[in-house]
Image (cartoon, rainbow, N blue to C red):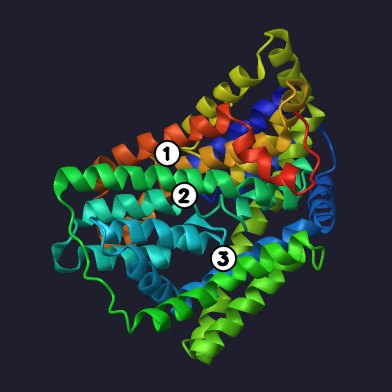
Amino acid sequence: MSNALIIMLAVMGGTMLLRAPISFGMLAGGVAYLIVKGQDVGLMAEQVLNGLYNSYVLLAVPLFILAASIMNAGAISERLFAMAIALVGHFRGGLAYVNVIVSVIFSGMSGSAIADAAGPGLVSIRMMTDKKRFTPEFAGALTACSSTIGPIIPPSIPLVIYALVSGTSVGALFLAGVMPGFIMALSLMIGIYVLGRIHNFPREPRTPFKQLPKVLIEGFLPLTLPIVLLGGIYSGIFTPTEAAAVAAMHAILLTLYYRSLTWSRMWHVMQESLRQSASVTLIVASAFIMNYAIAAEQIPDLVAHWFTLHQFTKIEYLLLMNLIFLVLGCFLDTSTMLLVLIPLLLPATRAMGVDLVHFGVVVVVNMMIGLVTPPFGMLLFVINALTGTSLKGMIRESVPFMVLLLIALLIITLVPQTVLWLPQSMGYVTTQ
């Protein structure tokens, strides 16, 4: 490891300790690297601009962010809840099942765990804690854990970013996330069933039969979005990047139909989406110069050589990656890990013979679990900020759900066909 790389990491770490945005730390570290190496600092601008202009798939990220923001602001989640309550509310712990089902449905619209937690997740917590049906800590913990499904079932912003850095097909990754997302949802529902029996969770009254058709029809309309998206992508009508624009337009049309979004509110949504998109884009831009330094130091080749030297099997390699990303997920942001660590590991992953689609889904599931893991636990912090629910209490209540999510991760890791069967059956070429 050269002195320039050590200084780059030190500068990056120092800015993080000063609580500066991670993107600023990466940019500062990149500048320090170029100065120590005696290279033109203008090379940073060249790397950033070339990276951004050559990343057509990156356009999908701000458009999916906009679609999620419109869905949250347009009162669409309330209609999804009404439909889910009509279907499963009468079971023991019905609202807990509703929480998971709405997360699964909303994941087909937003692709963002934070959007899921801050939108329908907040509605779910209010419903679950009304009349003290559930404790705020349990409702917050379940919401945080169910929100992790958001970026697994397509569309998915983290999978789009993974496709950007790995060169993997976005369409294949989207299909690959379907079954793992349902496995995660099923694991949470098993936990709800067991805890419901132990703690005698309440049931909701059945929806009157006369109201059922109206509730189901209104709840079904938002479900047309994932149908349009996936149908358009896999029929070749539009690309995954163009699908993001279709998602945003579809969300706007739904809010116009429901008449649930004023022009002033829409302006606020556009501003908030712009801020979130700028934050993601800045991280992506700063990662390009970091990746330049890592490539110049030949770190990926050294990592690949180390793994091949120790003769890891595919399964051993994936289990080790699980351990690494679960630990790093406690401290680092998802985008940072995707943009900095994945390029570092790609040569080793190819050398191990691991399918890049399978690897991408496994890595993203790890990162989503990291969003609920202390001390970083971004989803827990979001819910704490929105509701004031005790962090300590949510962490305690999340333990059984975290164990079940880890079991789901183990299944996804050890049984590659849970990830690869759907894209392979749709004609995408994957390597074993």
Task: Determine whether, in the image, residue 262 is placed left or right of residue 41.
Answer: left
Task: Tell me which label, 1 or 3, sits earlier in the chain.
Answer: 3
Mark 3 residue crowding within 10 angstroms, few (<14) / some (14–19) / many (20+): many
Q: Above or below — where is 344 with respect to 122? A: above
The residue carrying mark 3 is 109
- The spot of residue 125 in percent (x, y) is 29, 63
Q: Are marks 2 and 1 in contact (CB under 8 Å)?
A: yes
Query: Residue extending furthest top?
Result: 310
From the viewer's side, name the closer residue of 379 and 74: 74
Which residue matches tag 2? Answer: 148
Q: Secondary structure at mark 2?
A: loop
Image coords of residue 248 (percent x, y): 64, 74
| Crowdedness near tag 2: few (<14), some (14–19) or many (≥20) residues, C-alpha within 10 Å | many
For the C terminus, the quadrant is top right
Residue found 31% across the figure and 43% down from its top: 191
List the residue tagged with mark 1: 405
Tag 1: amino acid: Leu
Alpha-carbon span between mark 1 and mark 3: 22 Å
Image coordinates for residue 235, horizontal then vertical, percent: 79, 63
